[in-house]
């Protein structure tokens, strides 16, 4: 246990002079203040200066508010990220649907082209058959 010995030098003129009430307390507070010790509002002995203690409390409150705001910000950003991810998935699904529809249209176009070629070949075949039949008819009549 550490003991602190407080000493003060008082000149005889100071002893006899008219003293204001509480000058001893003020003097003791000054001496303690020089030693790094202070009294708080409840007259409890503290190591920190009351102003530093108050600033520390204010800083602690500001830090708590800051952390709360960061937490709220993270929630908002998390919600925004989820929304953007959902929109990205929907956009990807729509893109796939569009690619599928485009491929289907290309397929249908190729089928029609193939069908048109088949019909043209059938027409050419029927024309040749018609011409043969016409020639056979002319020969027979």
Image (spheres, grey):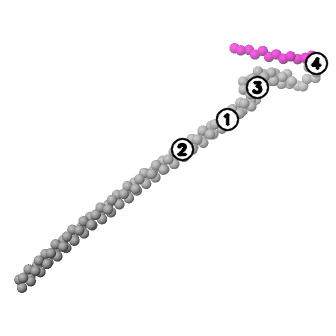
N-terminal of the pair, mark 2 or mark 1, is 1
> As rendered, which of 135 and 27 lies closer to the eye?
135
Q: Main secondary structure of the magenta part?
A: loop
Q: Position of residue 43 (x, y in %)?
A: 76, 26
Q: Which residue occupies the foreground of this view, 53 or 84?
A: 84
Q: Is residue 137 visible?
A: yes
The span shown in magenta is: 1-12
Q: Which residue is mark 4?
A: 13
Q: Which residue is mark 2?
A: 75
Decide: few, some or many residues near mark 3? Use Cα within 10 Å; few <14, some 14-19, many ≥20.
Answer: some
Find the distance from the CA under tag 3 to the CA under tag 4: 29 Å
3 or 1: tag closer to the N-terminus: 3
The furthest residue to the left: 140
The N terminus - image quarter: top right
Q: Which residue is at 48% across, 47% downward?
A: 82
- Asked if the stretch drawn in magenta spans residue 7, the answer is yes
Q: Earlier in the sequence, mark 2 or mark 4?
A: 4
**Is residue 81 depicted above or below 45 in this figure?**
below
Given residues 119 and 45, the one toward you in this image is 119
The reply, left or right, for residue 136 in relation to residue 31 is left
Q: Given this view, does label 3 or label 4 mark the residue nearer the observer?
A: 4
Counting the numbered discs, the total is 4
How far apart are the two marked residues, 2 and 3, measured between alpha carbons?
A: 43 Å
């Amino acid at each position: 246990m550490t003991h602190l010995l407080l000493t003060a030098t008082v000149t005889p003129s100071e002893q006899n002079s008219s003293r204001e009430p509480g000058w001893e307390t003020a003097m003791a507070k000054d001496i303690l203040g020089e030693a790094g010790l202070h009294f708080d509002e409840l007259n409890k002995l503290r190591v920190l200066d009351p102003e530093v203690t108050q600033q520390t409390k204010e800083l602690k409150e500001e830090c708590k508010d800051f952390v709360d705001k960061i937490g709220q910000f993270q929630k908002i950003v998390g919600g925004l990220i989820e929304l953007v991810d959902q929109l990205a998935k929907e956009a990807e699904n729509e893109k796939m649907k569009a690619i599928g529809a485009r491929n289907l249209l290309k397929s249908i176009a190729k089928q029609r082209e193939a069908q048109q070629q088949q019909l043209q070949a059938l027409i050419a075949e029927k024309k040749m058959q018609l011409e043969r039949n016409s020639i056979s008819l002319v020969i027979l009549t």
